[in-house]
C-alpha cells in the first residue's frame, strides 16, 4: 500500500483506527507519519460510512483503499459495495468507474461464498 501511495497521489486509505494506532493488526503502522492525515483517514466505527466514503471518492477519481478490520462486518457495507460500487459501470453504460480496493482480515467468518456469487466484483483471494 505504501509503495502505491508513494507512486500515486490519488491513493489514500480510510478505516477505523488506522492513523496513529496503526490499524487493529498494525498494517498501517507508520503510514500517517509518512503520508499525513489527509491520505491516512481515520473514520468513525461505521462500515457503511467507510464504504460509502470510498465509493464516493472513487467516483470523483480518487483511488481509495477501504480498510475493514474484520470480515464479520462487511455485510454492513454490502449496499455500498454491491449495489453502488460493483454495479455503477453497468448502470451508466460503461461510463462509470469505481476503482477501489477493499482489504481486511478474515478472522471468524469466511465470506468468499458471497463475493463468488457477485459477477461484477473482481476478487483476489
Image (tube, rainbow, N blue to C red):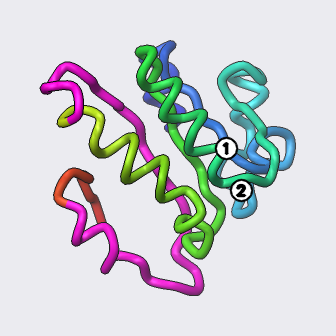
Q: Residue furthest front?
A: 91
Q: Earlier in the sequence, mark 1 or mark 2?
A: 2
Dot 2: few (<14), some (14–19), or many (≥20) neighbours within 10 Å? few
Q: Are marks 1 and 2 in contact (CB under 8 Å)?
A: no
Q: Which residue is mark 1?
A: 49
Q: Which residue is mark 2?
A: 26
Magenta stretch encompasses residue 75? no
Q: Nearer the viewer, residue 92 or 45?
A: 92
Magenta stretch encompasses residue 95? yes
Q: Position of residue 121 (x, y in %)?
A: 26, 53
Spatial separation of the CA atoms under disc 1 and disc 2: 22 Å
Dot 1: few (<14), some (14–19), or many (≥20) neighbours within 10 Å? some
The residue that appears at 37% across and 53% down in the rendered structure is 82
Locate residue 40: give its quadrant. Answer: top right
Query: Which structural element holds mark 1?
Result: helix
**Left or right position of 115 against 53:** left
The residue that appears at 30% across and 45% down in the rendered structure is 86
Locate residue 108: give its quadrant. Answer: bottom right
Q: Position of residue 8 (x, y in %)?
A: 44, 16
**Left or right position of 81 against 17:** left
Q: Residue furthest right?
A: 20
Q: Nearer the viewer, residue 117 or 83?
A: 83
Q: Nearer the viewer, residue 36 or 115?
A: 115
Main SS, magenta region, reads loop
Q: Residue furthest bottom?
A: 108
Query: Which structural element holds mark 2?
Result: loop
Mark drawn on residue 10: none
**Left or right position of 94 against 7:** left
Magenta region, residue range: 91-118
Amino acid at each position: 500500500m505504501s509503495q502505491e501511495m508513494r507512486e500515486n497521489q490519488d491513493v489514500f486509505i480510510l478505516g477505523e483506527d488506522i492513523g496513529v494506532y496503526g490499524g487493529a493488526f498494525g498494517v498501517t503502522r507508520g503510514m500517517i507519519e509518512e503520508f499525513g492525515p489527509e491520505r491516512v483517514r481515520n473514520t468513525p466505527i461505521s462500515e457503511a460510512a467507510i464504504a460509502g466514503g470510498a465509493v464516493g471518492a472513487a467516483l470523483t477519481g480518487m483511488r481509495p483503499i477501504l480498510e475493514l478490520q474484520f470480515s464479520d462486518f462487511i455485510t454492513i457495507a454490502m449496499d455500498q459495495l454491491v449495489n453502488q460500487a460493483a454495479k455503477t459501470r453497468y448502470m451508466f453504460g460503461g461510463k462509470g468507474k469505481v476503482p477501489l480496493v477493499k482489504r481486511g482480515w478474515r478472522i471468524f467468518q469466511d465470506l468468499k461464498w458471497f463475493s463468488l456469487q457477485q459477477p461484477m466484483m473482481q476478487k483476489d483471494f
